[in-house]
Amino acid sequence: MKKLLSFSIALLSITTLVACSGHKAESKAPEEKIEQKQIKFDEKLFKEAGLLPFKNEKQLELGELDSKSRATGAHIQLKDSDEPTEKRESKLTYDPVGWHNYKFFYGDGKKEAWLMSRGHLIGYQFSGLNDEKRNLVPMTNWLNAGNYSGTDDQNQSSMLYYENRLDSWLANHPNYYLDYKVTPIYQKDELIPRQIELQYVGIDENGKLLEIKLGGSKEKVDQYSVTHVVLDNVSANAEINYLDGTAKNTVEDAKIKEKAKKEAEEKAKKEAEEKEAAEKKAKEEEQEKARQATQEKEESQESNSQSTNSGGYFRDRKGRWHRPNGKFASKKEIREAGLQW
């Protein structure tokens, strides 16, 4: 009995040892290592090119307002999936410094439209920012939307031309990033920027810079493959005071213009009629003078003839007789001279 019990204990010990050994062997099995590919980029190159460092994520930097409360610039790096999906609110409550607005006539003066808009440096379709003061400056509608009224993204002088095409570039390159920077250019203390500078470049998965050409005639590519565009903050129908943002309409109201044209035509017609009348009168006076001269000549000749045939007596134009010395002759004298009174 004791032998049987000892054998059972020994067998149980062996079984337990084997099971523990198996567990230890399993725990020593090598773990699989997952390698994460580190994206490398030329940090020095990016800095020299004026780009944001490549972090493989959306980045947005807004310059702080300067001492005159002017927006100083905006910089973003994103890919297509980073774009906002919510619809932009149409109403803005912030008025950037220098903001004024006027409804001005344009074209032939038959229509009018608002001159200025509160323009986003980085468009909402990229930034998702709407009423952000660091991202807003006064822009003419011509610069912002490409038209006096409504939009025209075919206008290469507008931001919309480049924004829509950069948006399409992102959609066509979903794995690439876009580095996009917008800078307002001021002159001294002026509150309204004279120009807006855009700069943009693509970045592939490995942090390599990719040149982007959108077809605009204003595009210039630098040595880093970054494209630069400078747009003028102007409008052909306005004269803008960039110092304070006030402006004057340079296109006349068509109704006023038509009225002025009609008045000018009537004035010209009246002046032509007066000139014609003056010329006619002058001609008639000249003809009258010529007639009188002819008549006087004839009368003189007749008088001389009468004077010769009447003993020196002659008649004037009124039929009065004169002596050869010019004095009036009496009726008696005339009759004695044998002349008809």
Image (tube, rainbow, N blue to C red):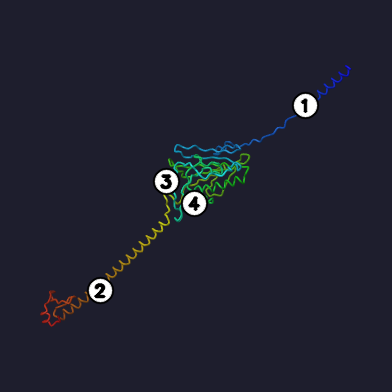
- CB under 8 Å between discs 1 and 4: no
Marks 3 and 2, how far apart in space? 69 Å
Q: Mark 3: which amino acid? A: Thr
* Rendered location of residue 189, percent (x, y): 43, 40
Q: What residue do we see at 39% from left, 60% from top? A: 262
Instruction: Tell me the residue that label 4 is attached to.
Output: 149
Mark toward the viewer: 3 or 4: 4
Q: Quadrant of residue 54?
A: top right
Q: Earlier in the sequence, mark 3 or mark 2?
A: 3
Instruction: Check residue 23 in the rendering and tell me which mark sits there, or answer none.
Output: 1
Marks 3 and 4, how far apart in space? 19 Å
Mark toward the viewer: 2 or 4: 4
Task: Tell me the crowding category of disc 2: few under 14, some 14 to 19, or many 20 or more residues within 10 angstroms, Cα based.
Answer: few
Q: Mark 4: which amino acid? A: Ser
- For this orientation, the residue located farthest to the front is 1
* Rendered location of residue 74, percent (x, y): 52, 40
Q: Is residue 95 left or right of residue 11?
A: left
Q: Earlier in the sequence, mark 1 or mark 4?
A: 1
Of residues 174 and 91, which is closer to you in this image? Answer: 91
Instruction: Check residue 291 in the rendering and tell me which mark sits there, or answer none.
Output: 2
Q: Earlier in the sequence, mark 3 or mark 4?
A: 4
Marks 1 and 4, how far apart in space? 79 Å
Q: Quadrant of the N terminus?
A: top right
* Rendered location of residue 278, percent (x, y): 30, 66
Q: Earlier in the sequence, mark 2 or mark 1?
A: 1
Marks 2 and 1, how far apart in space? 148 Å
Q: Mark 2: which amino acid? A: Arg
Q: Secondary structure at mark 1?
A: helix
* Rendered location of residue 242, percent (x, y): 43, 44
Position of 25 relative to 182 (above/below):
above
Instruction: Tell me the residue that label 3 is attached to.
Output: 246
- CB under 8 Å between discs 3 and 4: no
